[in-house]
Amino acid sequence: MQYFTNENNPDTMLDCARLMVEAVPLVMRTIRVESHRHAPADLSLPQLRTLGLLAIHPGISLCVLAEQLGLLPSSASKVVDQLVTRVLVTRQEDPADRRRAILTLTEDGKEMLHSSRQAILPYISERLATLSTDEQTTVAAAMSLLRKIFLPDRDAQLDPAADLETK
């Protein structure tokens, strides 16, 4: 395992960034596969990902949601429509801009997301159990630091310029 000692060395930061760019997609793929495997049969992966994004970014617009999901706005709108029909998401008109809808999770949506996440924890825990206690501590510390530097408020609300939508 490579350890970094000089925090201000640009090469070290680039090496760290490369490791993160390589590792995060592997972790996310595992989480997606396991989430899909444990999700209710009638909940698609885009629907589950939408619930997750709305938990992180309450009040997100449809255009920004579509961008985050990698979907066209019309496709994201269909996903949201399905979740609204199931009473997992609410869509409210923004009083400041009628062209913009405010999307939020309902209590049922929060519970569905929580249940889905809880279902994958045993699998992730099994993978982590293959690490030593020190390595597990390192991973936990790294996740805490990554969460701190990538919190949604650091994204300037995910580019407000992209926040206009039409339905």
Image (cartoon, rainbow, N blue to C red):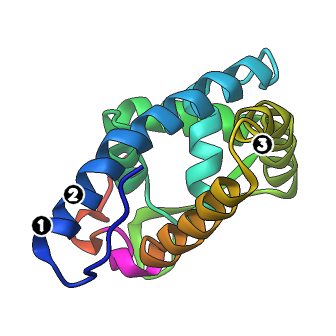
Give the residue type that dot 3 points to.
Answer: Arg
Give the residue type that dot 1 points to.
Answer: Asp
Residue stretch in magenta: 153-158
In space, the residues marked 3 and 2 are separated at their CA atoms by: 31 Å
Residue underneath mark 3? 117
- Give the left or right position of residue 6, taking residue 69 as reference: left
In terms of secondary structure, where does tag 2 sit? helix
Residue underneath mark 1? 11
> Eyeballing the image, is 142 above or below 36?
below
- Residue at point 71% right, 33% down? 127
- Residue at point 57% right, 39% down? 49
Mark on residue 15? 2
- Residue at point 26% right, 58% down? 17
In space, the residues marked 2 and 1 are separated at their CA atoms by: 6 Å
Dot 2: few (<14), some (14–19), or many (≥20) neighbours within 10 Å?
A: some
Rendered image quadrant of residue 71? top left
**125 or 138: nearer the eye?**
138
Among numbered discs 1 and 3, the one appearing first in the sequence: 1
- Give the left or right position of residue 83, taking residue 74 as reference: right
Front of the two marks 3 and 2: 2
Front of the two marks 1 and 3: 1
- Residue at point 41% right, 64% down? 100
In terms of secondary structure, where does tag 3 sit? helix
**Is there any visible trace of residue 126 in the rendered image?**
yes
Give coordinates of residue 122: x percent, y percent. 85, 35
